[in-house]
């Protein structure tokens, strides 16, 4: 075999091997969670995430990224409550913050929920915010006093609540959820993940179908 032909065949073989290596590398990269700026992998659930229902080790995990001022989130709230009741014991339901910039009070509402969470009253504030959404949403200015009144009605320690609201760590906690959501390509609310897979919602019952499939799959 002439040297030129041998060199050509070797070059082709090397190119094929490199192509295969490149494909395998690309697949492996896609399979790995995208790292955050701190180098940590993105997750649908973290150890500090707010769990409304804990179904145990074998339960299906449902995660909702929400904005308390979002009208669609408000519309889904009763649907979610029905699903939580229907699949009690079969699902672990997790809520994560994703305040949208177009909603003036979305961050204030999230801060109120997080401040309540620090007193183990997250779910009470979560419910109050959605049940009263039409009373405070779509304002032209922030109304933190409205959420403070909710905290008083819930019987929270108001000194601790006020301190939490102004503590930068509270806002950082909210924004850390949003950062994970953005990394997971969440761009609207509500966005649901069922056992780590994003649920494609086209109809009202699509979320239930996704949960049903995961529970009985």
Image (cartoon, helix red, strand yellow):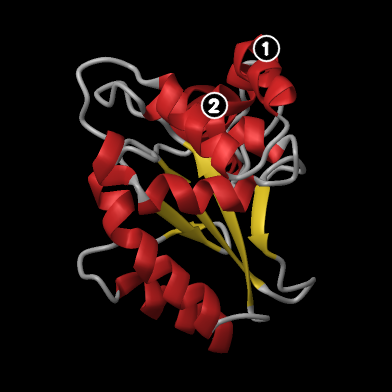
Q: Quadrant of residue 103?
A: top left
Q: Kindly identify which residue carries mark 1.
A: 167
Q: Residue at position x 35%, y 25% from top?
A: 105
Residue 17 visible? The answer is no
Query: Which one is earlier in the sequence, the residue at label 1 or at label 2?
Result: 2
Q: Residue at position x 39%, y 77% from top?
A: 208
Q: In which quarter of the image is residue 168?
A: top right
Please tell me which residue lies in front, 160 or 164. 160
Image side of residue 87 versus residue 192, left or right = right
Tell me where residue 187 appears, x and y as whole percent.
32, 36
Image side of residue 53 versus residue 198, left or right = right
Furthest toward the bottom, the residue is: 216
Q: Kindly identify which residue carries mark 2.
A: 111
- The crowd level at tag 2 (other Cα within 10 Å; few <14, some 14-19, many 20+) is many
Please tell me which residue lies in front, 5 or 190. 190
Please tell me which residue lies in front, 39 or 60. 60
């Amino acid at each position: 075999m002439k040297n030129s032909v041998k060199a050509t065949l070797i070059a082709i073989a090397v190119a094929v091997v490199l192509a295969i290596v490149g494909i395998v590398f690309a697949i492996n990269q896609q399979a790995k969670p995208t790292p955050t700026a701190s180098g940590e992998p993105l997750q649908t659930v973290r150890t500090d995430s707010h769990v409304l229902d804990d179904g145990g080790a074998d339960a299906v995990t449902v995660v909702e990224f929400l904005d308390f001022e979002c009208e669609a989130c408000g519309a889904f709230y009763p649907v979610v409550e029905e699903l939580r009741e229907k699949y009690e014991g079969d699902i672990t339901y997790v809520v994560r913050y994703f305040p949208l910039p177009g909603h003036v009070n979305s961050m204030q509402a999230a801060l109120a929920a997080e401040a309540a969470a620090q007193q183990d009253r997250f779910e009470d504030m979560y419910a109050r915010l959605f049940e009263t959404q039409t009373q405070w949403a779509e304002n032209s200015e922030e109304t933190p006093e409205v959420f403070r009144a909710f905290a008083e009605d819930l019987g929270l320690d108001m000194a601790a609540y006020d301190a939490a609201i102004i503590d930068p760590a509270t806002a950082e906690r909210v924004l850390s959820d949003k950062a994970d959501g953005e990394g997971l390509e969440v761009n609207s609310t509500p966005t649901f993940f069922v056992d780590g897979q994003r649920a494609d919602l086209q109809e009202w019952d699509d979320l239930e179908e996704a949960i049903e499939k995961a529970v009985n799959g």
